[in-house]
Amino acid sequence: MNRPAWFLAWRYVATHRLQAGLLTAALGLVLALPLCLHFMVRATQQNMEARAQGTPQLLGARGSALDLMLAGLYFKRQALPALQQRDALSLRQSGLAQVIPLDLRFHAQGAAIVGTELDYFAFRGLKPAQGRLFARLGECVVGAALAGSRGLKVGDSVYSSQEQLFDLAGVYPLKMRISGVLAPNSSADDEALFVDLKTAWIIAGMAHGHDDVAKNKAEQLSQSAKHTVANASVRTFNEVTPDNEAGFHFHGNTQDYPLSAAIVLPRDAKAEAILAGRFQGSKTQAQLIRPAEQYRTLISTLFELQRLSLALFAAILLAASAIAALVFALSFRLRQREFHTLTELGVPAAALRRSKLLEVVIIGLMSIAGSLILSSLVAVLSHSWVRWLLS
């Protein structure tokens, strides 16, 4: 009974492919947006949750706790106030917790440079898939995703990026040799580059190596019993090698050197409570946060935004449906002569009505199919996109 109606509807859609395709794409995209948003929020939650729950406490300078969490856990570049190393050392000497310092101020062509200690790799369960962990100044270890995207391997070199275009202090990019490539662990570590804390201080210009001016008289400006002052002709090293490593030296008290944050691993629940209470009412410049609490705050904000976005998408869907109905109504009006001719050829009026309805059904089914395909693609790639956005 419905064969003529199906035939007429399908032939019209097949003949007017461009019109049908544009309408299908518009409706499919609007239908897919809520699902895509859901998958992205879920991927963000899953990607961030394990890392936040697995980090008991985070030490940083007073400021935004959320910025501290995003920087300390996910290496998101934030303008964090500096934490002095003496604060981390004081906490470590208390015997209440293991402290893993982090220097997150620098990057290498967009990839975060994480200055830390070897304890970090044990804490995160990171092991090299190739080579070994860093053991000397100027060596670095790269994450799996970073190595894959840039084609890096053991023995290659990478340069730190200059933070300012015109650096009058003369802090030049440091050439670092890759000693190892980490195995993937589906976290922000995959997109980062890790160096020893002292190497990060070399990048910052707090330590440097140069020619021995005491042995190169021609390069000296003046010399007294206590001091040797060299001019600009003295060569400053931008790479640490076995030959010049002994010549690198640090200036000032290293306890005053800045850190971005420090991961705090209390020895037990009692120690965690003691530390939280100690910093809660403290007037020091340092703060101690629980990343899990900041994570819940962030996720609740994301869900509120998701609900607002869903309401907006519902309004957009209603508007798109109204526009689609208008398009169909105008199309049917413009085709009155076509329908009149079909009626004269013996096609029943009921079959024409069914063909109009079936055109709408075909476009609707194609839109739903397109939205499901797009949503499935986003569901598959959402974790990779979230890791890239958080890196």
Image (cartoon, rainbow, N blue to C red):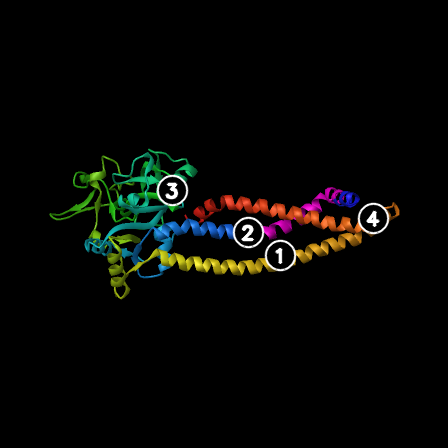
- 105 sits to left or right of 368: left
Say which label, 2 or 4, has the lower sequence index: 2
Point out residue 355 in the picture as x, y percentages from the top left corner: 77, 48
Say which label, 2 or 3, has the lower sequence index: 2
Which residue has dot 4 on it? 338
**Magenta stretch: dominant secondary structure:** helix
Q: Mark 1 near mark 4, Cβ–Cβ under 8 Å?
A: no
Q: Residue, x 84% and y 46% (percent of image)?
A: 347
User: Which one is in front, 257 or 87?
Assistant: 87
Q: Residue, x 62% and y 56% (percent of image)?
A: 317
Amino acid bearing label 3: Asn
* Quadrant the N terminus occupies: top right
Q: Secondary structure at mark 4?
A: helix
Number of the front mark, 2 or 4: 2
Q: Mark 2 near mark 3, Cβ–Cβ under 8 Å?
A: no
Q: Mark 2 near mark 4, Cβ–Cβ under 8 Å?
A: no
37 shown above or below 243: below
Say which label, 4 or 3, has the lower sequence index: 3
Point out residue 88 in the picture as x, y percentages from the top left corner: 24, 54
Q: Mark 3 near mark 1, Cβ–Cβ under 8 Å?
A: no
Q: Secondary structure at mark 3?
A: loop
User: Which one is in front, 144 or 355?
Assistant: 355
- Measured Cα–Cα span from mark 1 to mark 2: 13 Å
Say which label, 1 or 4, has the lower sequence index: 1
Q: Which residues are magenta?
A: 10-35
Amino acid bearing label 2: Leu
* Label annotation for residue 317: 1
* Label annotation for residue 35: 2
- Measured Cα–Cα span from mark 1 to mark 4: 31 Å
Q: Secondary structure at mark 2?
A: helix
